[in-house]
Amino acid sequence: MIRHIVMWDVSGPTAEEKQGNIERLRSCFEGLRGRIPGLLHLEVGNDASGVEYACDVVLYSEFESWEALAAYAVHPEHLRVRDELVGVRIARHQVDYEVQFD
């Protein structure tokens, strides 16, 4: 299984607009559930710590294989979401790793 974790900082000149963008991001990514072959699990979380160095949002997802993750990257539904959120995400960090089960 492959874990794909992405963290973003989100734009918004006011706290209300930033929160609206966070909710928009959440809704868009959660809408991918059941639409991407090989996507086993997807969740989106907002930072609750409030520390200065924290990212605003995290996407935690699990894929069947590296091939499934690669297919997700170019899947039309994922590309649509990515394009819908242009300008909303202002910084991005990503980690992908394989999980071995004994």
Image: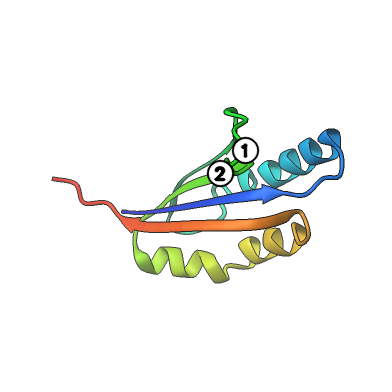
Q: Which residue is mark 1?
A: 52
**At 71% from the left edge and 57% from the top edge, which residue is drawn?**
90
Q: Which residue is mark 2?
A: 58
Q: Position of residue 75 (x, y in %)?
A: 57, 67
Camera-near label (1 vs 2) is 1
Q: Position of residue 7 (x, y in %)?
A: 56, 49
- State the residue in front, 5 or 27: 5
- Asked whether the residues under the numbered discs 1 and 2 touch, taking CB atoms below 8 Å apart as contact, a structural biologist would say no
Image quarter of the C terminus: top left
Question: Residue extending furthest left?
Answer: 102
**At 62% from the left edge and 50% from the top edge, which residue is drawn?**
8
By what rule are the colours in the image chosen? Answer: rainbow
Q: Position of residue 87 (x, y in %)?
A: 78, 59
The first of marks 1 and 2 along the sequence is 1
Q: Is residue 89 left or right of residue 13?
A: left
Q: Is residue 56 left or right of residue 17?
A: left
Q: Position of residue 22 (x, y in %)?
A: 72, 41
Q: Is residue 69 left or right of residue 1?
A: right
Q: CA distance from mark 1 to mark 2?
A: 16 Å
Q: Is residue 69 above or below residue 22?
A: below
**SS class, disc 1:** loop
The residue type indicated by label 2 comes to: Val
